[in-house]
Amino acid sequence: MIAIIDYGMGNLHSVSKAVERLGFEAFITADAKEIMEADGAILPGVGAFGDAMQNLQNTGLDEVTKFYAASGKPLLGICLGMQLLFSESEEYGRHEGLGLLPGTVNRFQGDFKVPHMGWNKLEFKQQQSPLFEGLTPGHVYFVHSFHVKPERSSDLLATTDYYGQVTAIVGRGNVYGMQFHPEKSGELGMSLLRNFLALKGARETVR
């Protein structure tokens, strides 16, 4: 049973359908008890960081997500959901995130097209991650104007190149994030999602 956390912002149904296509049962919920009882949880997200955090706080799902991370069961943030895992964002002002992973979310700076939109190749930084089991780097689909700068290099699992190194996948213990949309990223995206769904709890929880 995989909980898709519903805080009013996110591609909930496309993520849910992708999970089901991989043979897992998914349900969309904002109920704390249901989320905490799930075998795994996904925090999707589309939109602005500040609005998303406001919605999470208004519904109490910010604390639920933190408790879930502390439980040791697998948690995955997708796109904006990955950014929300971090300490803070500079998107339209300064906004505190969930603080599950240390780092900041910053706008792309430079003389190039923003948002970053399209297919880019991943570079696996930590091949031993269970997310990469049986996989080789390939292309996945990105749409974003802000990018994460993790404080700890050990949290950086994969990058892509868009006028410089861009964080693509993060993870520590049982908490993971993907900046791209795995459900829209073909065979590799679905394989990465499958490997996440196959996790049965982490060796260490986030501290």
Image: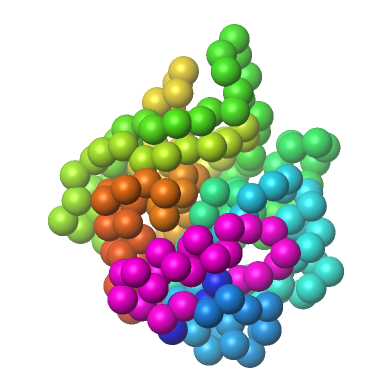
- The spot of residue 22 in percent (x, y) is 31, 69
- The spot of residue 157 in percent (x, y) is 36, 46
Residue 87 or residue 184, whichever sits in front: 184
Q: Would residue 66 appear left or right of 141 to someone viewing this image?
A: right
For the point 44% across and 72% down, the residue is 74
Above/below status of 113 relative to 82: above
Q: Specify the segment rendered in magenta.
A: 5-26
Q: Magenta stretch: residue 17 in it?
A: yes
For the point 42% across and 39% down, the residue is 141
Q: Would residue 59 appear left or right of 77 to someone viewing this image?
A: right
For the point 80% across and 41% down, the residue is 94
Image quadrant holding the C terminus, namely bottom right
Residue 156 or residue 159, whichever sits in front: 159
Image quadrant holding the N terminus, namely bottom left
Above/below status of 60 relative to 49: below
Residue 22 or residue 85, whichever sits in front: 22
Q: Kindly tell me whether residue 70 is visible in this rendering.
A: no
For the point 32% across and 57% down, the residue is 190
The residue lying furthest to the left in this view is: 134
Q: Kindly tell me whether residue 111 is visible in this rendering.
A: yes
- The spot of residue 9 in percent (x, y) is 69, 59
Q: Would residue 59 appear left or right of 188 to someone viewing this image?
A: right
Q: Magenta stretch: residue 105 in it?
A: no
The residue lying furthest to the top in this view is: 111
- The spot of residue 110 in percent (x, y) is 60, 14
Above/below status of 37 relative to 90: below
Above/below status of 4 relative to 122: below
